[in-house]
Image (tube, helix red, strand yellow):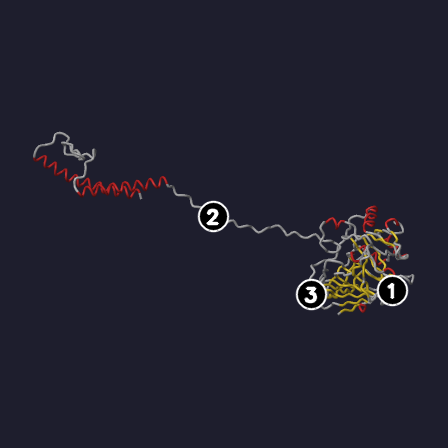
Amino acid sequence: MHFQLSVSAATILRMNDDHQTSQHKDAHKHSEDNSPISKWEHGAGSAVVSHHGKHKWWPPRMPRTKKQWIITIVVLVLLLGGGGVVAYKITHKAKPKTVTKQITKKPSTKPPIQPITSTLTGLPISDSAVNDKPVTAVMIENSQSARPQSGLDQAGVVFEAVAEGGITRFVALFQDSAPDYIGPVRSVRPYYIQWLMGFDAAVAHVGGSPEALQDLKSWGAKDLDQFANGSYYHRISSRAAPHNVYTSMANLNELEAKKGFGKPNYSGFARKAASPSAAPNATSIDFAISSALYNSHYDYDKTTNSYKRSEGGAAHMSVNSAGAQTQNTPKVVIGLVMPKGIEADDLHTSYNTLGSGQAYIFQDGTVTVGTWHKANNVTNFTFTDPNGAEVKLNPGQTWLTALGSASSVSYK
């Protein structure tokens, strides 16, 4: 732009120069006609012409005609305008353009934090060290004189079977709970030992059948027999013997530590998230275990997605040390169909608990009729559906009952 303005001004100056040259030529011609000029002539604001007839541009000569005045003014305006543009450009440098860079946040690559759950129950726990505690099994009586029992409502897993003479008994497993009042504690049988060994559990009991006492030794079970460790148990005065032996989880954990029974090595049940059915089809369950006093019944409670347990025609309750009672309400109920018999002494019951057999798995208000599997003493139960796919269980208490035949199960 400055270059263009300068060119225009030069052009105008040349035009003015041509005009003045023409005038000087006329003047020079006139001087030749009269007398030559032998010295510089000065006029106010006028250019000087030498005696050789040539003109000089300094000092400048004032314009004489209107046309010269117009040309001079235009030249000055253009010169001043061009200089102003140059000065503006020098003093007003262009500011750099602001470039806004968009930052795209990368999605987080951190995996979601998985909740810590109990290996025994599948329930959330606040400290993973809970899974390092021993699993403790306690043999609990179920005769009429033993009811209501204590601690069953806080057990993670409960197995139920006939002990002798049609009278059922429980083995209750604890790890992520610590009740201070558990009992009545009674004697053990071989099949209970096989079940609890699948959890690498130590077993609290008061003696046992001859077969069971032998099996404890030969199978290498973790033994907490009251006969050899009486100070970790006590008898209550409100019940008559043999229905009055009680203990606490604190006492049993102390005994386990003394014996060196530490972190267990086992696989818990495969678990899933609870998912109550929108259309429950198995809300009333009956297990005909032996007789009316011991047969069990469950009513599905959709609100809590659990099963209210009854036996002998009444709600099956647990009582704590303060006398408060709570109905036993497992989250999962399983009927294990397995061959049932009598030991050689014609008194104690036996079950063939290894191998596989039919299983009725009740959870979420529905039933899956599948298969149970247990390869040996130290492996746990697994379950499959009719297609062979693994059946996963809801978190919470699981109650398993041994049944002699599939006809012992009914539901609606």
Badge 1 amino acid:
Gly
The residue shown at (74%, 48%) is: 129
Q: Residue furthest right?
A: 345
The answer, for residue 280, to whether it is visible in the render is yes
Nearest the viewer among 388 and 360 is 360
Q: Position of residue 251 (x, y in %)?
A: 83, 49
Q: Position of residue 264 (x, y in %)?
A: 78, 50
Badge 2 amino acid:
Thr
Q: Residues within 10 Å of mark 1 (few under 14, many from 20)?
A: some
Q: Mark 3 falls on what kind of element?
A: loop
Nearest the viewer among 252 and 236 is 236
The answer, for residue 200, to whether it is visible in the render is no
Q: Is residue 10 above or below residue 170?
A: above
- Between marks 1 and 2, how big is the CA–CA gap? 84 Å
> Which residue was labeled with disc 1?
166
Q: Position of residue 96 (x, y in %)?
A: 42, 44
For residue 190, the mark is: none
Q: Position of residue 357 (x, y in %)?
A: 79, 64
Nearest the viewer among 166 and 384 is 166
Q: Is residue 147 above or below residue 257?
A: below
Cβ atoms at labels 1 and 2 below 8 Å apart:
no
For residue 277, the mark is: 3
- Between marks 3 and 2, how big is the CA–CA gap? 54 Å
- Between marks 1 and 3, how big is the CA–CA gap? 35 Å
In the rendered image, which quarter is residue 404 located in?
bottom right
> Which residue was labeled with disc 2?
100
